[in-house]
Image (cartoon, rainbow, N blue to C red):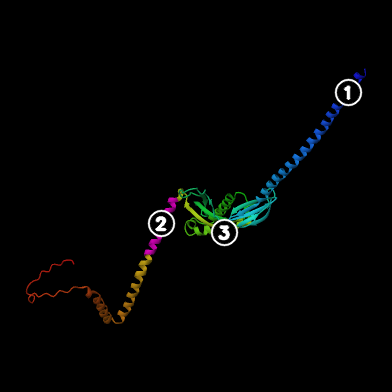
Amino acid sequence: MTLASDQALGSDTRREADHAAEDLTRGVEPRSRSGLSRLAWRRHRYWILAILGLFLGAHLASGFYVVGADERAVVRRFGAVEAEVGPGMHYRFPWPVDRLDVVKTTSVKKVGVGFAIPAGESAAPSGMELVTGDTNIVNAALVLQYVIRDPAEFLFQIEEAPAYVEAVAEGVLTETVIGMPIDEVLTRGRVAVQERVKAETQELLDRRRSGIRIVSASIMTMTLDRSVVQAFQDVANAVADREKVINEARAYASNLIPKARRFLALQKEYEKAPDVTRTRLYLEAMEKILPKLQLYIIDSDKGRVPLHLGVTGP
């Protein structure tokens, strides 16, 4: 009985020891796993911070920019113009703080007034129809050349700069031509039209603060409408014929009047001394005639032998 009791007691003791060992093992494993995870997080945290630092540095470095010799840059900070900078290397805060706009300020741009400038070579443009002061119709085409004077105004004060410049110049050209007669428009008034379009277009652009400076205005074509070309040509020919006849009459008068004055002067002298004046005029005439004559001396036996002279040309 004693042996059986001891065996039962031993089996209970071993069972309790096994349970205690299992409980101890369960408590150690969670603590060791928690320590390993904290160590791994520390290592990964350094890598994450290093990567974020690299991205931040690259983002800040993107703020460096270079402006070319023929360019100017406008820096906007949260939408408002912060600065205008010239050629060279500069720095601005990266997006979304600052924004950068670069424009070329030395390149000359062209816009057609009354026609679209073709990409390549083409025939002369037909232009737009305009009514002159004497109710004639002309086809006019003009080219404006301009540069950017103020980049900030050019970027933010107007939209579609070429279309705006063309519209302003078309209005000025229409007002200019409608106040001039057709003859002046097609002849001596062409230069005046160019200068007026350039000046008044520039005035309107400055009033609008466009940031544009007009360099030149050149008329490409200024022709009559086909329906009146022949009639105008007939008038032009008649005017040319009139001027020709007038010039011929003036030349004839310039040649005849001095001769008449000389004749009247000689008449007065002749009335004072007819014989002397007649002799002087005769001698003057002979002085002009004799040098042109050819003299021949022929021996004809004292005139008893008849001569037969054949008159021939030189």
Front residue (pair 15, 287): 15
Q: Amino acid at mark 1?
A: Gly
Q: Quadrant of residue 241?
A: bottom left
Give the percent coordinates (x, y) of residue 255. Answer: 35, 69
At mark 2, the secondary structure is helix
Real-space Cα separation, disc 3 to disc 1, in angstroms: 120 Å
Quick check: is 230 in the magenta stretch?
yes
Closest to the camera, between mark 3 and mark 2, is 3
x, y percent for residue 172: 57, 54
Query: Between tags 2 and 1, which lies in front?
Result: 1
Judging by the rendered image, the residue that carries numbered circle 1 is 10
Residue furthest out toward the top: 1
Question: What secondary structure predominates along the stretch shown in magenta?
Answer: helix
Residue 232 image point, x, y percent: 44, 53
- Residue 210 can be seen, yes or no: no
Figure label count: 3
What's the distance in space between the residues labelled 2 and 1, CA to CA?
A: 148 Å
Determine contact: label 2, label 1, CB under 8 Å: no
Residue 208 location (% of width, % of height): 63, 55
The circle on residue 238 is: 2
What residue span does the magenta drawing correspond to?
Answer: 229-248
Q: Amino acid at mark 2?
A: Ala
* Mark 3 or 1: the one toward you: 1
Other residues around mark 2 within 10 Å, as few (<14) / some (14–19) / many (≥20): few
Q: Which mark is residue 199?
A: 3
Instruction: Kindly identify the residue that appears in the image at 38 percent across and 62 percent down.
Output: 245
Residue at 27% in and 80% down: 280
Mark 3 or mark 2, which has the lower sequence index? Answer: 3
Q: Is residue 245 above or below residue 22?
A: below
Q: Nearer the viewer, residue 124 or 72?
A: 72
